[in-house]
Amino acid sequence: MIHYLWEKFPYKILTDPEYVDFDFVYQQLKNTYWAATRTRTQIAKAIAHAIPFNLYQEEDQIGFARVITDKAVFAYLADVVIAPRYRGNGLGKWMVSCILTHPDLKGCKILLETQDAHGLYAQFGFELRESMKKQL
Ligand SMILES: CC(C)(COP(=O)(O)OP(=O)(O)OC[C@H]1O[C@@H](n2cnc3c(N)ncnc32)[C@H](O)[C@@H]1OP(=O)(O)O)[C@@H](O)C(=O)NCCC(=O)NCCS
């Protein structure tokens, strides 16, 4: 699998799953409204079956997102988090903008669900749509 890198000193985003700081991602997701009850096993499996976007300041991971995709038609953007002390500096927007240029996602319809960050995604042209879902 090809991995991609975006750089904006002192920050970088890398899609290599080998470089996921799992404890960082686990702790960040534990503090979200949508993933607080996920187990470590679920989180590890969810990362393994998606494209991870790991945001680092130098060597430290400070943000994460992942995309589940068939690389042709659909892609689902999930688990977008920036560590609290780094928020409000444009890093979330930079990460979303990099994700949208990932070559494997070209031509895909990008879906996502969020309760409160609509303003972030609206800036990139995401539209509010109704959808159906069921929990298994
Ligand atoms: C949402 C999140 C990833 C944004 O990252 P960030 O680095 O703080 O965001 P940025 O500095 O790049 O700016 C975000 C922009 O989206 C807007 N926005 C809208 N809703 C927002 C929200 N709930 N949280 C943060 N920003 C939001 C901001 O006002 C800002 O707009 P601006 O360019 O007009 O100033 C980060 O706040 C976070 O990790 N929050 C907790 C987890 C979460 O809610 N994730 C999103 C669910 S998919």
Image (spheres, rainbow, N blue to C red):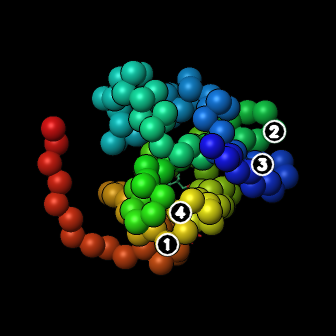
Query: Is ligand 1 within 8 Å of the beta carbon of the residue shown at mark 2?
Result: no
Circle 1 sits in a helix, a strand or a loop, which is it?
loop
Q: Nearer the viewer, mark 4 or mark 2?
A: 4
Query: Disc 2 and disc 3: Cα gap in Å?
Result: 6 Å
Q: Is residue 77 above or below residue 82?
A: below
Residue with the mark numbered 1: 107
Q: Residues within 10 Å of mark 4 (few under 14, many from 20)?
A: some
Please provide percent x and percent y for residue 23.
56, 23
Inspect the image, locate mark 3, and give the three-letter code of the amino acid beneath it.
Tyr
Residue with the mark numbered 2: 58
Mark sitting earlier along the chain (3/4): 3
Residue visible at 77% across and 48% down in the picture: 11
Inspect the image, locate mark 1, and give the three-letter code of the amino acid beneath it.
Gly
Q: Is residue 126 above or below residue 21?
A: below
Relative to 134, 28 lies left or right: right
Residue with the mark numbered 3: 11
Please provide percent x and percent y for residue 73.
40, 66
Please provide percent x and percent y for residue 22.
56, 26
